[in-house]
Amino acid sequence: MKIHCIQHVKFETLGTILEWIEQKNHLLSTSHLYKNTSFPEIDAFDLLIVMGGPMNIYEYEKCPWLKEEKAFLEKAIAGGKAVLGICLGAQLLADVLKAEVFNNTYKEIGWFPVSVGRAEKGEIPLLEGIPEEFTAFHWHGDTFSLPEGAKRLFESEACKNQGFIHGNRVIGLQFHLEMSNQTIRNVIENCRDELVEGKYIQKEDEMLDRTDLLKESRQLMFRLLSNLEKTITH
């Protein structure tokens, strides 16, 4: 399978997704938008993964590539490609699908529980083997409404729409299952100014060295990707 990744900033990488890709011997290409704006032809990949970043989806002056990226996402969706958006990536997908992206009531930063949404779980192959509740890593202040025709996949106490699926190939996840301890350190180092007092904002020491939660996240990330792979290849 051919996978293309859009990376918005140097410090928000594929994380454990790269391990899954290597284990499966899939082919990977990447657009590094912090270096240059370059996108592949639509027929050059089977799965598009859109990573996170600290920017807002409408910061066009700061990030002039945003408009081109949205046009590319529209083209990929129209072309029937499988697309997985994480955090900012999910917000971009929601925007492209004509949903609203806005400031959430709470910023959510750290390890917090996520539960499977009320959509009929048995009807969504992506959720096969995913527990009803798990603890995921979060780092976001914005959220999105559900695109028309989409199903809510996940929710949390602080944020109603933690994930959606549109059709059976376009998935947005607000949280981060791909994180390793190093990638969490990288985000903290680059976005430390966001660690203010808040109901759903943890301290640095609460976020780091959570081996148990990182292990579970890795397993869940692998499961979701393998479920998505079945959808693409069958």
Image (cartoon, rainbow, N blue to C red):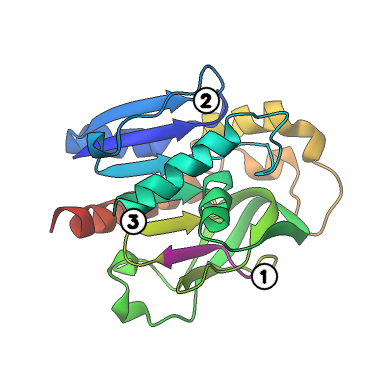
Real-space CA distance between mark 3 and mark 1, rounded to the nearest whole angstrom: 22 Å
Q: Nearer the viewer, residue 157 or 65?
A: 65
The furthest residue to the top: 35
Residue 157 location (% of width, % of height)? 67, 70
Q: CA distance from mark 2 to mark 3?
A: 26 Å
Q: Residue at x 48, y 36 (%)?
A: 180
Q: Quadrant of residue 224?
A: bottom left
Q: Which contiguous range is marked in magenta? A: 160-165
Where 185 sits versus 147, above or below?
Answer: above
Real-space Cα separation, disc 1 to disc 2, in angstroms: 33 Å
Q: Pointer 3: what residue?
A: 224
Label 2: which residue? 33
Is residue 204 shown to the viewer in this render?
Answer: yes
Q: Are dots 2 and 3 in contact, CB under 8 Å?
A: no
Q: Which residue is mark 1?
A: 157
Residue 19's place in the image compared with 152, above or below, is: above
User: What amino acid is at disc 1?
Assistant: Glu
Seen in the picture, residue 49 relative to 133 is either above or below; the reply is above
Label located before the other in sequence (2 or 3): 2
Image spot of residue 131 (x, y percent): 40, 69
Q: In what element is the residue under mark 3?
A: helix
Q: Nearer the viewer, residue 100 or 154?
A: 100
